[in-house]
Amino acid sequence: MKPAPFEYFAPSELPEALELLERYGDEAKVLAGGQSLMPLMNLRLARPKVIVDINRLSNLSFIAVNSSGVLTVGGLTRQREMERSVVVRQQNPLLAAALPMIGHFQIRNRGTLGGSIVHADPAAELPAVSLLLEVEFSLRSKSGVRRVRAQDFFMDYLTTALRPDELLTEVQFPSWSQRDGWAIEEIARRNGDFAIVGVALRIRMDEADMIRNAGIVTFGVGGIPQRVHRAEEGLIGRKPDPQLAAELAKVVAEELKPDSDLHASAEYRKEVGGVLARRALTSALVRARSKEEN
């Protein structure tokens, strides 16, 4: 299979890339890792007239932490580089745990942070983690930088708030609290496949062993990753007991409104979503309490 004909540009500077995006608009597609775009082009499901290859923009590949503990990662940073980064593991263990779940290592060798987020596959791990962690995206165009929160970025299946003339240049992850417990769970047909159902969860405990804050995001169950607000509210203010995880599983299963497809029925996804939420909460509580004991 071969892609439809296209015009190819490989800018060496960011202003040049932004100029091309402004000039060609909807006719252009950005090539970063190519792990999503190239298969779509080869199947002719995507037929861009112009490809803007940004792989020469080395200044968009970096991992940095400021004095406030905010982790900033360049949009062109390879997933494998993030996976191997000691800084990422120290500053955001949930992100570090999600990275090895993305496809196979060959895909992560080429795949980029920004590419996965902009592609916005609803079964992908990075969009879900971004939503849970309430990250902020820097979207740059010739006219300047626009900052968009994750909750405002994912709009529909494979659709985001990114404009045709914009490039995702940075992702800012808020500082991580060492009091947080977290977990990410998913089920797929085979190791490396997209998740049929996934759950990412984060809680914060207080000195009285009460859950002070909670966040739960499901992925693989609809057009975009989704927060389960009623389930989150049901955890806040609770002191964990043997029934809490089972209660959470029930609420999550009730709240999910998944689609049926060739991989799984909606009923299956609801049931498994509840099970994964229960497992995630159990793991998160263990992590939160181990930190308190230390």
Image (spheres, grey):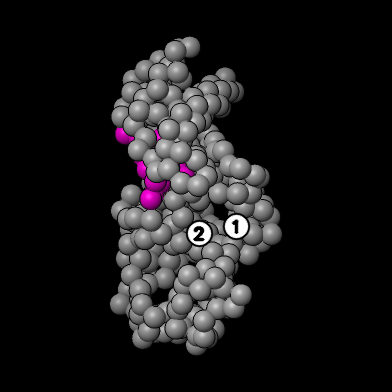
Q: Residues within 10 Å of mark 1 (few under 14, many from 20)?
A: many
* Residue depicted at 56% across the width and 58% down the height: 63
Is there CB contact under 8 Å for labels 2 and 1?
A: yes
| Residue 79 badge | 1
Q: For residue 224: magenta? A: yes
Q: Quadrant of the N terminus?
A: bottom right
The image shows residue 165, relative to residue 137, as above or below, that is below
| Residue 116 badge | 2
Q: Residue furthest front?
A: 262
Q: Is residue 228 left or right of residue 76?
A: left
Q: For residue 53: magenta? A: no
The amino acid on which the numbered mark 1 sits, given as a three-letter code, is: Gln
Q: Quadrant of the C terminus?
A: top right
Q: Is residue 227 left or right of residue 56?
A: left
* Residue depicted at 46% across the width and 38% down the height: 265
- Residue 179 in picture, x, y percent from top left: 48, 30
The amino acid on which the numbered mark 2 sits, given as a three-letter code, is: Ser
**Whether residue 60 is visible:** no
* Residue depicted at 61% across the width and 46% down the height: 101
Instruction: Report helix, strand or loop for mark 2.
Output: helix
Image quadrant assignment for residue 257: top left
Of labels 2 and 1, earlier in sequence is: 1
| Residue 223 badge | none
Q: Which residues are magenta?
A: 216-229
